[in-house]
Image (tube, grey):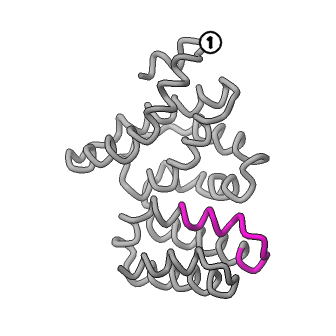
């Protein structure tokens, strides 16, 4: 319930309300890390919107809150070292997405995947699947395939299938039909 009010504040036309709501989100995360971690997909979506704000104060606050929330909620040791690249890609999607996708492809995923990890990575992978270049789609498909194999909790696997795979399913199907190499087709 509190998060919904913070999301509304982060969508406010007043930049001071956006900045204050983002700051309160960071404080909430410090006190209720696990609860915020389970809601990370929505949190990330709203923080990405604040990163694109016209006011530098909102952008700077959102970036710091993004880093703090991710550091507090994400425990996956495979993602921790590249988290900075991923967050930077959200601040500059055109210029930094390639670098972030390259880092994800070069990462050897061995730890189980949880909701906070997917919450951070899903928007990046969706963006990769929506790009026109096959190279982006191939990289995103490789990462999606690797991540899905590491979801071990049956209850979370259902969430993963509903919240992660179904959202990206249409992009995967489109990429598969456009694939020029068997890399994408083999993953799905």
Where residue 40 sits, quadrant-wise, is bottom left
Q: Nearer the viewer, residue 71 or 39?
A: 39
Q: Position of residue 85 (x, y in %)?
A: 66, 53
Say left or right for 162 vs 173: left
| Disc 1 residue crowd, few under 14, some 14–19, many 20+, Cα 10 Å | few
Residue at 58% from the left image edge and 16% from the top image edge = 179
Q: Is residue 2 above or below residue 38?
A: below
Q: Position of residue 89 (x, y in %)?
A: 69, 52
- Residue reaching furthest front? 13
Residue at 56% from the left image edge and 83% from the top image edge = 21
Tally the marks: 1
Q: Position of residue 140 (x, y in %)?
A: 56, 34
On whether residue 56 falls in the magenta region, the answer is: yes
Q: Which residue is mark 1?
A: 180
Element assignment for label 1:
loop
Residue at 53% from the left image edge and 24% from the top image edge = 174
Where residue 51 sits, quadrant-wise, is bottom right
Say left or right for 30 vs 46: left
Q: Nearer the viewer, residue 109 or 10?
A: 10
On whether residue 2 falls in the magenta region, the answer is: no
Where residue 147 sits, quadrant-wise, is top left
Give the quadrant of the N terminus: bottom left
For the stretch drawn in magenta, what is the main secondary structure?
A: helix
Q: Is residue 148 above or below residue 94?
A: above
Give the quadrant of the C terminus: top left
State the extent of the magenta-drawn residues as a range: 45-58
Q: Is residue 52 above or below residue 174?
A: below
- Residue reaching furthest left? 154
Q: Position of residue 12 (x, y in %)?
A: 61, 79
């Amino acid at each position: 319930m509190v998060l919904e009010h913070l999301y509304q504040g982060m969508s406010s036309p007043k930049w001071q309300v956006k900045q204050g709501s983002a700051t309160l989100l960071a404080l909430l995360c410090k006190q209720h890390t696990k609860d915020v971690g389970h809601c990370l997909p929505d949190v990330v979506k709203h923080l990405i919107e604040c990163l694109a704000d016209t006011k530098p104060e909102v952008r700077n606050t959102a970036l710091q809150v993004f880093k703090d929330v991710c550091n507090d909620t994400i425990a996956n040791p495979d993602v921790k070292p590249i988290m900075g690249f991923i967050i930077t890609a959200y601040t500059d999607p055109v210029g930094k997405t390639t670098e972030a996708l390259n880092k994800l492809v070069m990462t050897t995923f061995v730890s189980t995947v949880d909701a906070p990890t997917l919450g951070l990575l899903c928007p990046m992978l969706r963006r990769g699947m929506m790009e026109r270049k096959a190279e982006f789609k191939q990289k995103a498909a490789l990462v999606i395939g690797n991540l899905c194999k590491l979801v071990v909790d049956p209850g979370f696997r259902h969430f993963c299938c509903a919240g992660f795979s179904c959202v990206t399913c249409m992009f995967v199907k489109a990429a598969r039909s456009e694939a020029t190499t068997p890399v994408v087709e083999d993953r799905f």
